[in-house]
């Protein structure tokens, strides 16, 4: 059975981190960071070249479970993405701690302070954490 990749997005105002699984959907890997204003075009191009089964987007919530401010930017993006690539389902996953976890992963990975200040790298790692969280959640659904 041929499966498609699962793609995850850490959506930001200026730039968005992107991560993808392998085609067997076992491992999450950081792919890149894209300026958010180029994100739709990038995704359309990517799904034209690679089999993508699903898109996961980090759901920004505050500690009190209310949507964070960024949700007002994400909702129009989701509508545009659904129109541009209607065949691919979109799901949300809570992303409350991904930036903190990304910084922690960078420190634990021995990255120097200068590398940890690379916001694009933080966004890509955050997308990878979002995707890994999603993959972990699937294990408990079966």
Image (tube, rainbow, N blue to C red):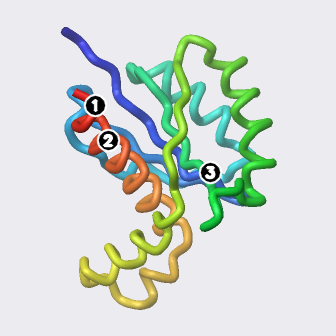
Toward which corner of the image does residue 22 lie, by quadrant?
top left
Does residue 17 appear to the left or right of 41 in the view shown?
left
Q: Rounded to the nearest whole Å, what is the CA distance between mark 1 and mark 3?
A: 26 Å
The reply to whether callout 1 and callout 2 are in contact (CB within 8 Å) is yes
Q: Report which residue position mark 2 lands on.
A: 137
- Image: 58 above or below 65: above
Looking at the image, which residue is at 25% across and 32% down? 25
The reply to whether callout 2 and callout 3 are in contact (CB within 8 Å) is no
Does residue 28 appear to the left or right of 49 in the view shown?
left
Mark 1 secondary-structure assignment: helix
Q: Quadrant of the N terminus?
A: top left
What is the x, y in percent for residue 18?
A: 48, 47
Q: Rounded to the nearest whole Å, what is the CA distance between mark 1 and mark 2?
A: 7 Å
The earlier-in-sequence mark between 2 and 3 is: 3
**Residue in front for this viewpoint, 55 or 119:** 55
Q: Report which residue position mark 3 lands on.
A: 11
Q: Report which residue position mark 1 lands on.
A: 141
What is the x, y in percent for residue 99?
A: 50, 69
Q: In the image, which is nearer the foreground, mark 1 or mark 3?
A: 1
Q: In the image, which is nearer the foreground, mark 2 or mark 3?
A: 2
Q: Quadrant of the C terminus?
A: top left
């Amino acid at each position: 059975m041929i499966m498609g990749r699962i793609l995850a997005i850490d959506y930001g105002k200026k730039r968005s981190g992107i991560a993808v699984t392998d085609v067997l959907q076992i491992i999450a890997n950081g792919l890149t960071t894209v300026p958010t204003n180029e994100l739709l075009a990038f995704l359309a191009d990517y799904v034209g070249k690679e089999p993508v089964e699903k898109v996961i987007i980090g759901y920004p919530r505050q500690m009190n479970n209310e949507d964070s401010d960024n949700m007002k930017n994400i909702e129009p993006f989701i509508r545009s993405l659904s129109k541009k690539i209607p065949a691919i389902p979109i799901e949300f996953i809570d992303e409350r701690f991904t930036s903190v976890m990304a910084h922690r992963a960078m420190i634990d990975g021995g990255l120097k302070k200068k590398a940890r200040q690379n916001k694009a790298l933080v966004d890509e790692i955050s997308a990878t954490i979002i995707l890994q969280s999603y993959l972990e959640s699937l294990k408990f659904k079966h």
